[in-house]
Image: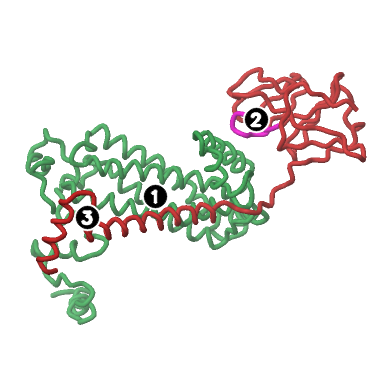
Chain colours: A red, B green
Amino acid sequence: MPKMTTTTQTHLSQEGAELDRREFFTRLGLGSLGVAAAGTLAFYYQFLSPNVLFEPSPIVNAGKAINFPRGSVTLDVDSAIYLVHIAEGFFSLSAICTHLGCMTAWKPELNMIACPCHGSRFNREGQKLAGPAPKPLPWLKTWLSDDGDLMVDRSVTIPELQFLRV
Amino acid sequence: MPSTIETYFDKLERTRVWKSIFRSGKGSSTLHNALAIQQNVFLHLFPTKVRKRMLGLGATWYLGTLTLGTFLVLVVTGILLMLYYHPSVPQAYSDVKDLQFIVSSGLFLRNLHRWAAHAMVFLAFAHMFRVFYRGAYRAPREFNWVVGVVLLLVTLLLSYTGYLLPWDQLAYWAITVGTNISSAVPLVGEKIRFLLLGGHLVNANALLRFYVLHTVILPISAVLFLAIHFWRIRKDGGLYVRESEPGAAAAQPTSEEQKPL
């Protein structure tokens, strides 16, 4: 590079706000690399997030209410929900422990729900009795279909003690 | 009079092909010995000279070498197991059962893979305890300690991702619990779990992702960090010698007077 150019550049950058050509192209180059890197990250993030999932529907048809006699707690292992029928009506609970996601089980002899992984215990309404679980078992949206089947949406939680009367 | 084998090797070492591959030449001088190490792509990671006492059992208990040994066993047995294992929901469990009951030597290789995995975790911890209590993690070896911590994490992740592959109840719930732990990360926890599993459930996507992590991504990371780990032993002045030991001052440069080898 001719010495003249360098002198001119130094002169320019000393004058203040204006960038000399080398500095400008360095920043332009680094900036473009940064943009490309961010784009690459976004590209991989999107690639790694599946757009279509072949997972079971969150809405479960539990069948006729008559199959669940009063006083019963029924665990459906496939959908991981409890259907409970007590004097106030029907409700359903998620059977997934709020600690680390294991499936709990109803223990009729103890009258409680227990998790096999780390020993959390819940009562029939899902409230925690013991163990590491940080939250009660969530109540799930439950309704009666037009055909008279009990329906549960596992993706929608509702406030506790909202009973479905059939 | 030299034996037939010796004459054979002597002839072999004079051939043009041999000389083109091994360029250090014939001879047993210090220079030849040093060149034999320096000019080998695998050996050049290591120091050309080691104090004889450091090769004894007492100096290191060979814990690092043994950890590498279990890793090599895992690579060999793992590649062989891959020839019969399909990482898919309908096949994974029965493939592992086939390996145990139908494939010749399958039970042996699977068990070897499993026990070597346990041994590697144990030996990596033992190696780190040894290094820690001897004080060998201190300057100028701090960076190699950090590389070692990375290698421990890679080892544990290899162990964890391999746990899912038999696709039995133990595997399923262990991965359910483990990925739920990762979702406890603030703000991005649920996203991390989603990306790890490739969905919201431990399912076909999760099995495939854990398989790819276990057989490609994590082993490549391990090999990369192992290479840095061994190379740094040389760069940091060889194996650690206690300052109180005779001749230690000469063998162990302090961080100021250390020269690149």
Which mark is drawn over residue B109? none
What is the chief secondary structure element of the magenta stretch? loop
Q: On the picture, is A57 further left or further right than B118?
A: right
**Disc 3 residue type (three-letter):** Phe
Give the Cα distance between marks 3 and 2: 51 Å
**Disc 1 residue type (three-letter):** Thr
Quarter containing the C terminus of chain B: bottom left
Task: Tell me which chain the residue with mark 1 is part of.
Answer: B
Mark 1: secondary structure:
helix
Q: On the picture, is A18 further left or further right than B192?
A: left
The x, y position of residue A135, in whole percent, is 63, 24
Residue B159 part of the magenta-drawn span: no
Q: Quadrant of residue A120?
A: top right
Q: Are labels 2 and 1 assigned to the same chain?
A: no
| Residue that badge 3 annotates | B46
Residue A98 part of the magenta-drawn span: yes
Q: Which span of residues is magenta-colored?
A: A95-103
> Mark 3 or mark 2: which is in front?
2
The number of numbered badges drawn on the structure is 3
Residue in the foreground of this view, choosing between B149 and A15: A15
| Residue that badge 1 annotates | B70
| Residue that badge 2 annotates | A97
Quarter containing the N terminus of chain B: bottom left
Mark 3: secondary structure:
loop
Residue in the foreground of this view, choosing between A41 and A111: A41
> Mark 2 or mark 1: which is in front?
2
Q: Residue at x 19, y 49 (%)?
A: A16
The x, y position of residue B250, in whole percent, is 7, 43
**Disc 2 residue type (three-letter):** Cys
Residue in the foreground of this view, choosing between A56 and B114: A56
Residue situated furthest bottom in the rendering: B16
Q: Quadrant of residue B41?
A: bottom left
